[in-house]
Amino acid sequence: MTSSPVSNQSYLTLNDGNRIPQLGIGVYLVPDGEPTEAAVSQALRQGYRHIDTAHAYQNERSVGRAVKASSLERSEVWITTKLWPSEYGEGTTAAAIDRMLERLDSDYIDLLLLHQQFGDYTGAWRDMERAVAAGTVRSIGVSNFESSNLEDLLGRATIKPSVNQVECHPYFPQDELREHLAPYGTLIESWYPLGHGDSGLLNEPLFASLGAAYGKTPAQVILRWHIQRGNIIFPKSSNHEHIAANMDIFDFALTAQEMQEVARLASGRRFYTLSLADQEKRLGAWAPED
Ligand SMILES: NC(=O)c1ccc[n+]([C@@H]2O[C@H](COP(=O)([O-])OP(=O)(O)OC[C@H]3O[C@@H](n4cnc5c(N)ncnc54)[C@H](OP(=O)(O)O)[C@@H]3O)[C@@H](O)[C@H]2O)c1
């Protein structure tokens, strides 16, 4: 973990050598247009240099506009986006990447993920590897790959996934997956880092007491825990104060004992509980508009 002179935040080096800002802003469920542009613009003004979107979120155009409207060079901002299974397959994925670049109004994507582990993900991966060779994508990774499909892809991939973006928070810290991915250098990106705003998680007495000790909110303590675990995070917020607070976590550190106390909250509880079969049925039946 190294410090950045830009925002005092930390960067991690991926298994392909690219350096990713460890903290970003996520825009899942943030409506396209003004809400996404406002959240991303505020984040960029406050030192965020990483945005996590997806074709499925239907707000890539707004992300692109906010980045363009900022005073920053494109190279200063890390943009992650994700392909939906309807876009998987050799040739199909190449065309989908071209449309993504248009929507983002960018010459390249920093990190491109397979959003779900269904469909022709191996064909998609081949096109993603070609996009890396062509320079239109810098890093590639997966999301929600937690079954035998992960082994399958790891076995076939020439470029090993740089990240696996999965549900991860103090109740479900993904210890096994983290250990499994370590030999490949694949990092964990945490979705639902704040439990999707779950009040039970945010109101855990431990986070209140640690927050009181450091002058931080429970949410800031949880985000700091992620950072010290080596997770890449992009909490979603459309709230002015939260966006500012979520970046203000680089001036304190939890002790090893405090990290252990948080580890004891691990209960195996996930907030997203749809079975794999139901996910495939439901998500496979949907395709994002262009
Ligand atoms: N790959 C995938 O399948 C997948 C799935 C889900 C999410 N994701 C990614 O992960 C990102 C984060 O996940 P998420 O948005 O679902 O959940 P999250 O970041 O865990 O939680 C977001 C919720 O927490 C609230 N919040 C944010 N900062 C807060 C603070 N400082 N104090 C109190 N509440 C706070 C937000 O409300 P306000 O807006 O009011 O602040 C919102 O209700 C997404 O935006 C997306 O980029 C990926």
Image (cartoon, rainbow, N blue to C red):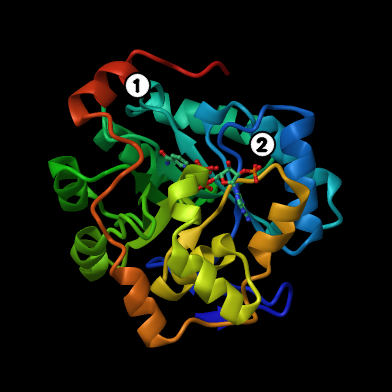
Q: Judge depth for marks 1 and 2 and give the one in front.
A: 1
Q: Which residue is mark 1?
A: 283
Left or right relative to 50: residue 15: left
Looking at this rendering, what residue extends furthest in the top direction?
285
**Image coordinates for residue 171, horizontal then vertical, percent:** 33, 56
Q: Residue 79, how many percent across, how many down?
A: 60, 49
Badge 1 marks a residue whose secondary structure is: helix
Quarter of the displayed picture in which ligand 1 can be seen: top right
In the picture, the disc for residue 104 is: 2
**At numbered mark 2, what does the secondary structure look like: helix, strand or loop?**
helix
- At a point 34% along the width and 36% down the height, the residue shown is 272
Along the line of sight, the residue nearer the viewer: 154 or 239:
239
Which quarter of the image is occupied by the C terminus?
top right
Examine the rendered structure and indicate whether residue 93 appears above or below residue 23: above
Mark 1 or 2 closer to N-term? 2
Amino acid under disc 1:
Leu
The alpha-carbon separation of the residues under discs 1 and 2 comes to 23 Å
Residue 161 falls in image quadrant: bottom left
Q: Residue at x 47, y 61 (%)?
A: 232
Instruction: Give the vertical position of 290 relative to 33 (above or below).
Output: above
- With 166 as the anchor, is 74 left or right in this view? right
The amino acid type, in three-letter code, at marker 2 is: Leu
Q: Nearer the viewer, residue 58 or 26?
A: 26
Residue 221 x/y as whole percent: 53, 68
